[in-house]
Image: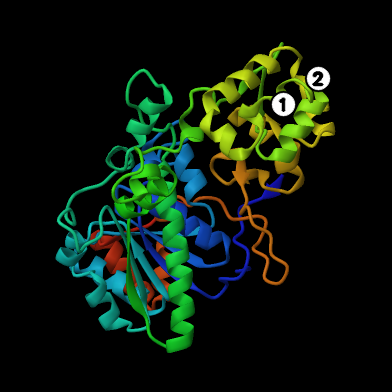
Amino acid sequence: MMDATRRPAGQGPLAGVRVIDLTSVIMGPFATQILAQLGADVIKVESPEGDNMRHVGPMKHAGMGHIFLHANAAKRSIVLDLKQEAGREALLKLAEGADVFITNVRPKAMARLGLDDEAVRARHPRMVYVSCCGFDQEGPDAARPAYDDLIQGATGIPWLMQEYGAPEPSYAPTTLSDRVTGLHAVYAVTAALYARSQTGEGQSVVVPMFEAMAQFILGDHMAGLTFDPPQGGAGYARLLTTHRRPYATADGMLCVLIYNDKHWRSFFAAIGESDGLGRDPRFASHSARAENIDAVYAEVSRILRSRTTAQWRELLDAADVPNMPMNSPADLLASPQLRATGFVQDQVHPTEGSLHALAHPTRWSGTPPARTFTPAPLLGEHTVELLREAGYSDGEVQSLLAAGACRAAVSEETP
């Protein structure tokens, strides 16, 4: 196991970039962890209560919940009370030495704090200011609150689940809206940094959840609504057929996708059906299969029950027909692929002990990110360190601590 108590020097394509991270829960922290894993120095600014996800179990110690551990590795934590003028001023001083300021606090609330894009960029015109919010600020819903469940519902996930055959509308059992929007935030940051390298100027970028997820869903499911007048209803039939699911074998489950014409010819040859189902017009072309997708997938479901999972994997691999096991999260942690690439790692956290950690999934030839990262920080673990970096003297830091404008972790040395 690696010793994760020391913070390595910055490494990766974003080495040298400093990010002020005023985000919490999942969307923003997911985005900023990617930036940190790519080499950026990410300063996580927390309230005295800490990020809400610190308090969601399971956990070994208070304030170190499992999702927080996974979304905040490779960052430094400073606690500032932004309701106090001294806390806001400390944040603005930190921002003077940063390249990116990213927040998922609603824009009107940031304006009330005097920390909106205009205020921050007045102190640092080259700043890239990224606001992750619920809705594009030019629309009538600009001020509405937004959470993953609400955005999933507003962009049609429950409708799709019911169309797929769920007994009632339901959300996808993952924070889909948060993570999709988080990826938009990552490219917004990197693209804006590139633009600054060309123009010398910073800018403000709004990354809205609703529009990001609407793009994600409508790209698949506009279907006949693409046309005016409509050429049919919404929904991509292949994704909505109830037969599109892992197939039961004689002794388990297997994920199989027989997709193109070559796959189908190989599949029928492997099971001895070249002159049987292989001549069925419903299977003859991509268009024919799409028009008969329910019947096509139902037939595959019937056939897959005739052999064991191991037998099917051997046969399908030999025929070069795509297939994968149906894994659980526990299976993923033991995956030979994820272990061999170093994506899943065993780490020793200085307070939480042994745990599994996830590396960045990409691999670079010229500016590779570090494959190991410092663990998620304790609340306020780096408060004193960061205030000193911002130019505060030890006496000034002590005054801020005494006034409650900032807070340090119990384990951090104070002046």
Q: Quadrant of the N terminus?
A: top right
Q: Label 2, label 1: how many angstroms apart (C-alpha)?
A: 25 Å
Q: Which residue is mark 1?
A: 279
Q: Secondary structure at mark 2?
A: helix
Q: Nearer the viewer, mark 2 or mark 1?
A: 1
Question: Which amino acid, mark 1?
Answer: Arg
Mark 1 Cα-neighbour bin, 10 Å: few <14, some 14–19, many ≥20: few
Disc 2 crowd rating (10 Å Cα; few below 14, some 14-19, many 20+) is few
Q: Is residue 258 left or right of residue 379?
A: right
Examine the rendered structure and indicate whether residue 282 appears above or below residue 110.
above
Amino acid carrying mark 2 in the image: Gln
Question: Is 372 left, or right, of 108 in this rendering?
Answer: right
Q: Quadrant of the C terminus?
A: bottom left
- Of residues 233 and 281, which is closer to you in this image? 281
Residue ID at (73%, 36%)? 263
Q: For this rendering, which residue is in front, 308 or 397?
A: 308
Q: Is residue 249 above or below residue 71?
A: above
The spot of residue 295 in percent (x, y) is 56, 21
Cβ atoms at labels 2 and 1 below 8 Å apart: no
Work out whether residue 54 or residue 111 is closer to the camera in this orientation and state it.
Answer: 111
Q: Residue at x 29, y 79 (%)?
A: 121
Q: Quadrant of residue 170?
A: top left
- Position of 330 with respect to 409 (left or right) is right
